[in-house]
Amino acid sequence: MKATHILGIESSCDDTSAAVVRDRILLSNVIAGQEVHRQYGGVVPELASRAHQQHIVPVVDRALKEAGIGRRDLDAVAFTRGPGLLGSLLVGTSFAKGFSAALGIPMIEVNHLQAHILAHFILKEGIAERAPAFPFICLLVSGGHTQLVLVKDHLQMEIMGQTIDDAAGEAFDKCAKLLGLPYPGGPHLDRLASGGDPHRFSFSRPRIRGLDYSFSGLKTSFLYFLRDRTKEDPSFIDDNRADLAASLQKTIIDILLNKLRKASHQTGIREIALAGGVSANSGLRETMRAQAEKERWNVHIPDLTYTTDNAAMIAINGYYRYREGRFAPDDIAPLARMYF
Ligand code: KG4
Ligand code: ZN
């Protein structure tokens, strides 16, 4: 059978990315971040769409060049339809429409969350297959989402539990901000935590039934804790930053792992995967490996390149949809909220 070349476009938040796959093999994955948000301490949607508009053409050109193919070699263009920032999604969606119309190739809509999970199925030339076997449970942790997903097949997924308020990434970012770290704080907090004592402080854990999560209480208790301690000792944060980071990180990881263990026990599934931006966290990666031994899990931890937003995961998702002929209609519009 002839190989299929898919171009993937990701523009749901503040990274403009384009990637090319030949069947499941990744040929290129170009990501342009947006520094402009740093000074505001968070993503400014209006600025994000403008930056996508500036980046998208050069990013796609580079992805094709690095893949060593021309536009005419493409069989389809896959794009993130949602969930995400509407203005940002519109840039990728409109670009995909123009591209598909000009080249006479189909468009494929991709759910950003499913894409994070399918990143495990990306192959690289010369690197052995190590994708999870179905069914598996995926802990999907990003800046906007925290979910336990039962993955039955490439395109068949069910949410088993999810956050009822903040996402884990949001908890990392908001608490990091309270410690005076720059945005996005997750990676900074991670680095700081590696030099701190995770048992030094303890913070309240949510009591939520079933497999759902909650992180807003933790953020509030962290805020009050810092406020009270700083009243007694104004240099409390400066003197204890690493221990605070390590203790907070441990609490978030404990909360995440608790429900993951529960989901595994309930279903008897021991094939476990991690996905999303927060899966770059070194403490979480380490804890998952340790749990794997203890619980006899077969754990799949994504390569760092595929943890945060990227178009490689959109392109691979596009590949699976292409195989089933699931193409998007011409009048498709992006969705800020999008479910499986
Ligand atoms: O998946 P992603 O790139 O974007 C969304 O779809 O949300 O995730 C971004 C989130 C941010 O909250 C960021 O702080 C967090 O992932 N993150 C981390 C680390 N690297 C990224 N959180 C903790 N530790 C990290 N090393
Ligand atoms: Zn994401």
Image (cartoon, rainbow, N blue to C red):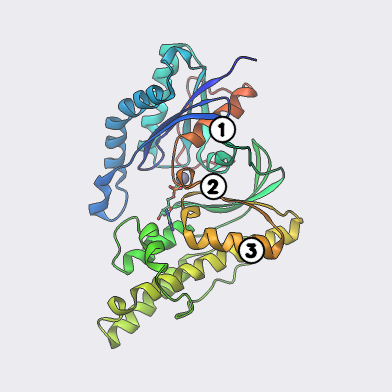
Sequence order check: which comes first, mark 3 or mark 2?
Answer: 3
Q: 276 or 53: nearer the eye? A: 276
Q: Secondary structure at mark 2?
A: loop
Q: Nearer the viewer's eye, disc 2 or disc 1?
A: 1
Measure how far apart labels 3 and 2 are at the Cα level: 16 Å
270 is higher (above) or lower (below) than 92: below
Other residues around mark 1 within 10 Å, as few (<14) / some (14–19) / many (≥20)? few
Q: Measured from the top left, where is residue 130 in percent x and y?
A: 63, 42
Q: Measured from the top left, where is residue 223 in percent x and y?
A: 37, 73
Q: Which residue appears at 58% of the width and 25% of the height?
A: 23
Q: 33 or 227: nearer the eye? A: 33
Measure how far apart labels 3 and 1 are at the Cα level: 29 Å
Q: Is residue 142 left or right of residue 273?
A: left
Amino acid type at image mark 1: Gly
Q: Which residue appears at 72% of the width and 45% of the height?
A: 135
141 is higher (above) or lower (below) than 242: above
Which residue is label 2 attached to? 302
Which residue is label 3 attached to? 291
Q: Nearer the viewer's eye, disc 3 or disc 1?
A: 1
